[in-house]
Structures are given as C-alpha cells and as structure tokens.
Amino acid sequence: RIISKNKFILFFSLYTAYLFLNLLINYSWENELTFFSEGMIGVWLILIISYDLLKDKSDFLILIKYLSFSILIVCLLGDLEVLTGLRISNLIFKFHLTNLDEKDFFQFAGGTDFYYRGGFPRIESTYTHSIFLGIALTFMLPILLFNKVEEYKTLFKLTILVSIITAFFTFSRTAWLGILVPFIVNTKKNIFLSVFIISFILFIGLPFLNKDFSESGYAKSSLSLQNRTILLDLVFSEVSFKTLIMGVGLTEVNSEEKFNFIEALPNDNSFAQYLFTRGILGTIMFLFSFLFLINQLRKNMKNLLEENKKLVKSILMIIYIQLAIYFISNSIFQEPRIWFVLFALIGLVLNILDFENQRLNIMPE
C-alpha cells in the first residue's frame, strides 16, 4: 500500500529490487553482504518507516532536535581530536575497549593516524574518513538555516556554529562546498555571517588548499577535479561494456584481483563507484528516482502552508547539493549512516505533501 501510494517510493523500491537481483547475479564468496544490507535495504526501510510514521511539522521538529544533538556529539569528538592531536581511535578510553592487535585495530577503527593537509591533521571523529565527517556535519545546514523555530532557536544556532567550525578542520573541499552554497543562498537573511564565511573560504581556505596541493603534487589547484574524474575515465576505458551494463556487483569486491588498473573501488568519485558496481542500468535508475522526487516536490510545493514550503525548499537544496557532489567527489550516497538521515527526512516530507494534498482534496502530481 505504501509503496504504490507514492511514485518516488515505488521507483526507489524498484531500484532496490534491481540491486538485489544484481547481487544475486554477481555474487561470489569474495563479496561482503553487509554493504548491501546497510547501504540499500536499511535505507529503503527507513524511507518506508518515516513515510508511514512521521506525519507533520511537529514530528519534523522532534527529528531535527535529536539530529542536532547528534551532530553536536560528533563535533565534540572531532574537537577532541583537534585539541589532543589524537584520533578518537587512539584516545585511551577507545583503545582500552578493544583488545585487538595493531593490525586488527586498524581494520576495526579505520586506522590510528591522521591524514594531513598543510601540516594540519584532518579530523575524522567517528567516521572512517574526514570527507564523510564533513558531509555529516554540513548536509543539514539548509534545514537549520531556512526553518526558523523559536522553540529551538538557540539549539539550531549552536549546531550551525559548532558544525561549521568542526567541518573546517576536515580540510575537505566537499564539506566546504556544503557550507558555501547554503550561505550564498541565505546571504540576505544572515548577511554578516554569510559574507564572513564566504570570504573566509574563498580568500583564506582555498588559497591554503592551493598551496598544500601544489607542494604535495596532489592536484594543480583546489578547484581541480582531475584526481576525481580520472577514476571515471578508468572505469569507462578499462571495464568492458558488457560488464559495465550491470556493474561488477554492489558488494565490496576484491577488485585488485579482478581489475589490476584499480587498487580499490573508485571511492573518490561516487558516480564512478556507482557505474563500477551498479552498472549503467543501476546508475540510471538511481538518478531517475531522484528526478522523480525533485519533480514531485516542486510540483506539489505550491499547495503547502508557508512553514512547510520552507521545509520542502531546504530538502530540495540538500538534494541539489548532494547530487552535484555525487558527480565530482565522495558523496552522501557512499555512507549509509548519513543516507539513513536523509531518507528519514525525505519520507517525512513526502508524507507532509500527501497530507496537505488530501487536506485540500488535491491529487498528488
């Protein structure tokens, strides 16, 4: 009933079913099944549950309140890394909880040392990479900026400020883009803060990255995407067209044995990773599901109350930003923990749309 009721949920359900079929076709004992269960089945269930249970703006506020607390906790752990110079996995209480040797601990915790940029450690907090931490801290900024709620005004402002400061120490272009775009759009409402943040990133942050990239040979400049797009070129040039149709399989593949040209899955480019694992067919279904969603939100937004319009607009901005990042870098669509939050918000917004349309006796478009 729920699946057939909403076009986006229906199409995303078909996409999930395709991924399961893809798994059966490409399955081998080298594959890791948890990647599918966490990355797709879990996300699909969160979408269904949130659409069915979360009904109105009050549910949204409760969800955002606890998500804000979660962000602050993650920021606190990241700030501890800044202050101590140690990864969370290296701190005494974390190390004490694991009786693993160094090799096993590396696999469990994602390593014990930082990556550095410009001589500064790139903090990771509870995530396996600073890029995913940056996405987790910044992707909700449009919601916190555009939805003014007096009851949670202080909490939202604190979350915005702390998440921006912590995200800066990831030294991730993806995170900085996630900060930059919402403040560019929101300049008129928060002119001083917006101008300060935009100026800081453009005139201090990016030149800092330019210097580091040039000295390390990582890239020609902070605006260069060559190190990201080269993975896409490799997928198209080295993988046979027949294999590319459905990909090599959704799960983690021992690709060093199968494809010598790639030491690991092309994780630095979400689009390349999706083509490599899900194939052209799966990637098209993924993108079309979001085109359905964007079209549905835009067409039905005009019937909403003003407060709900702001919520839908902020969700649309999140989707636009994350899809743009998807084509050029690591994105939210590679980290299940952030997927879950995004799709809980999407399910809630779709339910609000349907409820408002029913209230006005308008058939959803």
Image: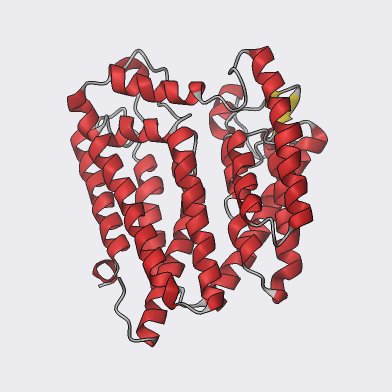
Location of residue 85 in the rendering, given as x and y in whole percent from the top left corner: 78, 31
Looking at the image, residue 349 sits to the left or right of residue 175; the answer is left
The residue at the point 27 percent across, 21 percent down is 239
All told, the count of numbered labels is 0
Identify which residue, 174 or 276, lies in the foreground.
174
Observer able to see residue 127: no
* Closer to us: 246 or 202: 202
Quarter of the image where one finds residue 45: bottom left
- Write the residue at 65% across / 54% down: 71
**Left or right placement of residue 114 versus residue 257 in this view:** right
Report the quarter where the C terminus lies. Answer: bottom left
Q: Quadrant of the N terminus?
A: bottom left
* Figure check: 270 above or below 266: below
Horizontal and vertical percent for residue 161? 75, 53
Residue in front for this viewpoint, 116 or 193: 193
Q: Position of residue 7 (x, y in %)?
A: 28, 64
**Residue 343 image point, x, y percent:** 44, 58
Q: Residue furthest right?
A: 83
Q: Is residue 219 above or below residue 151?
A: above
Colour scheme in the image?
Answer: secondary structure
Up the image or down, 147 lies above or below 21; here it is below
Q: Identify which residue is drawn at 39% across, 86% down.
A: 359
Whether residue 363 is visible: yes
Q: Looking at the image, is 345 positioned above or below residue 238?
A: below
Residue positioned most to the front? 188
Q: Is 288 displayed left or right of 105 in the figure?
A: left
